[in-house]
Amino acid sequence: MPSNNKLQRAGGFIDAWRGGFSRYERHISAAAMLGGFVVDNFTFGRIDRPAANVVFCAYLLLAAASIALLHALQSRMDRRLEELPESGAAETQSISDLRNTGRLHTILPAASQFALGGLWSGFLVFYSRSAVFSASWPFLLVLTAVFVGNEVFRHYRSRLVFSGVLFFFALYSYAIFVVPVLAGRIGNVVFLASGAAATVIFLLFLQVLNLVGRKRFKQSRLLLFSGAAAVLATMNLFYFTDVLPPLPLALANAGVFHSVKRIGATYSAVAEPQPLTAMFNLSRPVLHVAPGQSLAVYSAVFAPIKLTTKIAHRWRWYDPNRKAWVQQSVVTFPISGGRAGGYRGYTIKSKPRAGAWRVDIDTEDGRLIGRVGFEVVTVSQPASTQEKTVQ
């Protein structure tokens, strides 16, 4: 066993590199994640395109490799410290190896943060296409946890657990997108299959961690399994309580009009002019409806190529006496994937009463894709309108 003096000298080189990294760790990690966000915002388009999946897989591989390599280097450093020679050239070589390990301790965390940042930004690109903020908040929460984790989880064992659990979350989040694309349908069975696929891959990843650093892996094994189980349970809770949107469906466009009609491949709508606040979703559109008139809600829902399903427009009116949204009608129609701008359709409500309205655009089993809210004001004469083409 090496003397305390030699351990201190060997550790001094590592501490020097760690000290330099610690001083700039916040900036390096934040810059790496920001870099991932910037790259993804210019890279990702549609989830059913091979290029998007290649980028996602590359990020997952980079995250897995950097986490595993850092784990292996830590385990190797432990062994080298235990076997550090007493003196001579061999000691000099060992110290040199430890110095090189210290350099990698700066690079690898930044690499994993870049990969994870790229993954989260890619997920946000797709999740944020839903018009309902509540459908996207779980991933915003995850992003916040990633940044907080850079400050809180400083020790290696905690960082291994934190990074490993985040990696499983990334696998699961990606599987939610890609498995329905491969299956050509959505639903409970497909969602459960996504979780099973992510779990199998994560278990293989844990086997790699065990092989390259058995001792350190055993120290963190229980926390890794517990964290992954918590992610699995939470994601299933979110899904079966309708917190998560029915990915990979996404609302590409939606609006409320006095009428909508299809002319060949084009949809034409009769729109009532709205203030800028309504155009930027800062206020509800107000539609003035004369006796006998109707309203139409148009939606374009993106679905990947070869995916077919049904969606529903659920018209709800707010009853001020009951202080609740009361369903007035439901219209269901099939959609098929492939069109970049989404599969288009519209539904009509005759003689809508005055007050607050919303139309939930759901899957057939009631999972929310998007929502259109508006106010109806009854008038004696038709309002001024204009025709427009909707995409």
Image: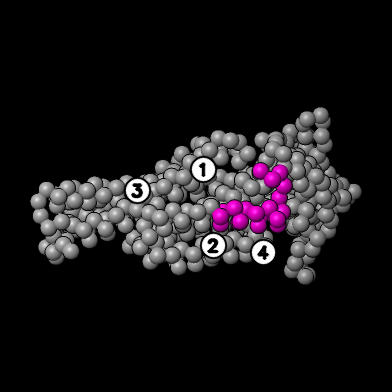
Disc 4 and disc 2: Cα gap in Å?
15 Å
Answer with left or right where residue 383 lies relative to residue 203: right
For the residues labelled 1 and 3, say whether their Cβ atoms are less than 8 Å apart. no
Nearer-N-terminus badge (1/2): 1
How would you rate the neighbour count of disc 3 (Cα within 10 Å): few for under 14, some for 14-19, many for 20 or more?
Answer: some
Q: What is the number of the mark on residue 231? A: 2
Spot occupied by residue 193 in the image (x, y as percentages of width and height)? 65, 54
How would you rate the neighbour count of disc 1 (Cα within 10 Å): few for under 14, some for 14-19, many for 20 or more?
Answer: some
Nearer-N-terminus badge (4/3): 3
Nearer-N-terminus badge (3/2): 3
Answer with left or right where residue 114 lies relative to residue 92: right
Q: What is the number of the mark on residue 241? A: 4
Spot occupied by residue 122 in the image (x, y as percentages of width and height)? 53, 45
User: For numbered disc 1, what is the local secondary structure?
Assistant: helix
**Which of 300 and 185 lies nearest the eye of the viewer?**
185
For the residues labelled 1 and 2, say whether their Cβ atoms are less than 8 Å apart. no
Q: What is the number of the mark on residue 138? A: none
Disc 4 and disc 3: Cα gap in Å?
38 Å
Residue marked by disc 3:
108
Nearer-N-terminus badge (4/2): 2
Nearer-N-terminus badge (1/3): 1
Residue type beneath disc 1:
Cys
Residue shown at the point (60%, 56%) measured from the top left: 195
Q: What is the number of the mark on residue 57? A: 1
- Asked if residue 182 is positioned above or below residue 25 in the image, the reply reads above
Residue range (magenta): 182-200
Residue type beneath disc 4:
Thr
As drawn, the residue found furthest toward the right would be 292
Residue type beneath disc 2:
Val
